[in-house]
Amino acid sequence: MPRSLPWSRAARSAGPAATAHGATAHGATAHAATAHGAGATSAGRPSAPHRYALPVAALAALSLVAACSGPPKDGGKDTAFKLSAGTPAPAGEIDSFTWAVYAEPPTLDYISAFDYPANTILSNVCESLMRWTPQLTMAPGLAEKATHPNDLTWVYDLRAGVRFHDGGVLTADDVVHSLGRQMDPENGAAWNSNFSTVETVTKTGPLQVTVKLKQPDSQFPQYMATAAGVVASKAGVEKAGEDYGTTGSLDCTGPFKLGTWSKGQSIELQRFDGYWGTKAKSAKAVFTFLTDPNARTNALLSGEADGGYLIPTESYDRLRASGPGTLYFGEGLSTVNVNVTSMKGALGDVRVRRALSLALDRRGFVKAGLGGAGTITSSLTSKAIWAGAPAAIRASAFDTLPSPDQNVEAAKRMIEEAGATGKTLTVATSSIGQDVSVLATAIQDAGTKIGLKIQLKTIAPNAFTSLFTDPAAREGIDMFPETYYDSITDPMDLLSNFQTGAYQNYAGYSDASYDTLTDKARAESDPAKRFSAAAELQKKASDQVLWIPVAEWPTAVFLNKRITGAPTTISYLYYPWAADVGAAAR
């Protein structure tokens, strides 16, 4: 999830915007094409994962993560936080509420929704074929039923009578067109690589769409609950043309429709009275852009903003102690990492990468950078992601990993053995939040202690997103802090990033055995076998220190005393969470 700042999802493919492929009405078919450049992997594959709760017997083969549906009971040993399953149910409706977000989305076009600000807003306006629930399970969305007649076929039967915000009625043509925009490499969709195993998307009935795969793919159906599976009106998208996502209507089906977008200030969403599901409890939701962490915190404390996700970590204590509201923590499926963006210099020697990992003071970072709300780790993936794996496989994914504890002397010897003493590395940092700046400083401190020269390059908060999308922005940068959140509850969501040519494989790592094992895991329908392959991949990624794992980080949400109902989990990125927000009990 490169999402705009240090927080990244697994962004997929970037490129120029363009008009989607044309499609005829009946029997319309969208053909998948291999993504250009970085969007394509060695096998023309992407990354993917998640899980189901559908009324379809065929989905039994995909019940890979049923056990990870519920968040853990607490933050774990030695942590200063407790995870909550949710927030209190609302007592009634409200006229409006204001939500603080750390940046303004450059667009709300669903094919470019790969970062926190865009998805936090878009999830309430546009809906997908499937739905990610607050419990991090899969449920029916715009498709009331999904069937899997064979390894290469998925059939989605749509809900009848669903209306778009501009008055049209949902049909199979809209689905074919929407997924076709994701698959067209000319559009540079952030989710393009998630369709790399798709052969065709075809209308097989007025309210039925059939997806044919080139090869088995256990992860594609899971991504249909993310922005990859969003369905917008074909007529509305074509009418808006190049302006789609930036002005006017998004013409989707969600409980809110796009209202006024005051550039540089806020986005207003209005309740959609023609919504097919349970109507939103608030008539209006206003998202205000506050890039400065202190301004965001002050807005929450003063009541200027009623709530917000991605709370500045340096503000946890102030918000906990405040009278205006409550700070909650929930399952985030997130790990804080150091993204290795270049292996052309000193980092090309795995001993240097291992030494930096070994010298890093993770406990100090969690205390200073995450406000104590985190747990140190040497795993790239969060433990919650593995909850659906058999116990023995789950243990194998973690027991062989190195200790996360700091050992400066051993790290210094590694640097000397590598002949890297005195070598210079550049780390990107930003004032976007204490978690980013503190981690960058921690890397500099670790490198200095073991004989490296670490330079910090400061990047403006609104420009940090370029590190995820623009190779030119990464020129001269060896590493940068990145919080990666999984968009589906499957370890392959993150581990697929190191396949040859994968979108976030910025350092250009390439290993044939890693690629083969990634393909095997993705094609495997048996959960135990898939988790077993993922455990092997985690070991390989750890041995090569492809990124430096630092800590697990929960989702944080603050609600003042006038509102309640927002989910505490990271589901808010794809679930219409704002519709659940209403008046708190008096």
Image (spheres, rainbow, N blue to C red):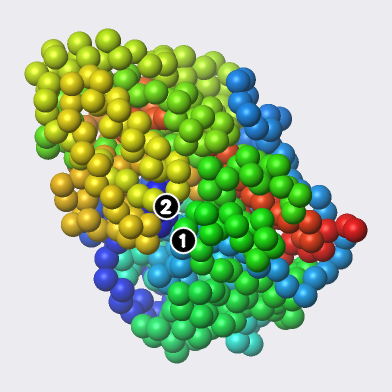
Task: From the viewer's side, name the closer residue of 207 and 413.
Answer: 413
Task: From the viewer's side, name the closer residue of 290 and 581.
Answer: 290
Identity, as a three-letter code, of the amino acid under mark 1: Thr
Q: Is residue 93 left or right of residue 251?
A: right
The furthest residue to the right? 586
Residue at 9% across / 18% down in the picture?
419
- The quadrant where residue 448 appears: top left
- The quadrant where residue 157 appears: bottom right
For label 2, the residue is 432
Report the quarter where the C terminus lies: bottom right
Q: How many marks?
A: 2
Residue 450 in view, yes or no: yes
Q: Is residue 80 left or right of residue 24?
A: right
Q: Does the CB distance between marks 1 and 2 fall below 8 Å? A: yes
Where is residue 173? Give x, y as percent. 51, 77
Q: Residues within 10 Å of mark 2 (few under 14, many from 20)?
A: many
Residue at 30% across / 28% down in the picture?
445
Q: Is residue 544 left or right of residue 263?
A: left
Where is residue 510? Give x, y as percent. 20, 36
Residue at 66% across / 46% down in the picture?
319
Where is residue 163? Give x, y as percent. 66, 80
For label 1, the residue is 291
Query: How far apart are labels 1 and 2 at the CA level?
Result: 7 Å
Q: Is residue 498 left or right of residue 574?
A: left
Q: Residues within 10 Å of mark 1 (few under 14, many from 20)?
A: some
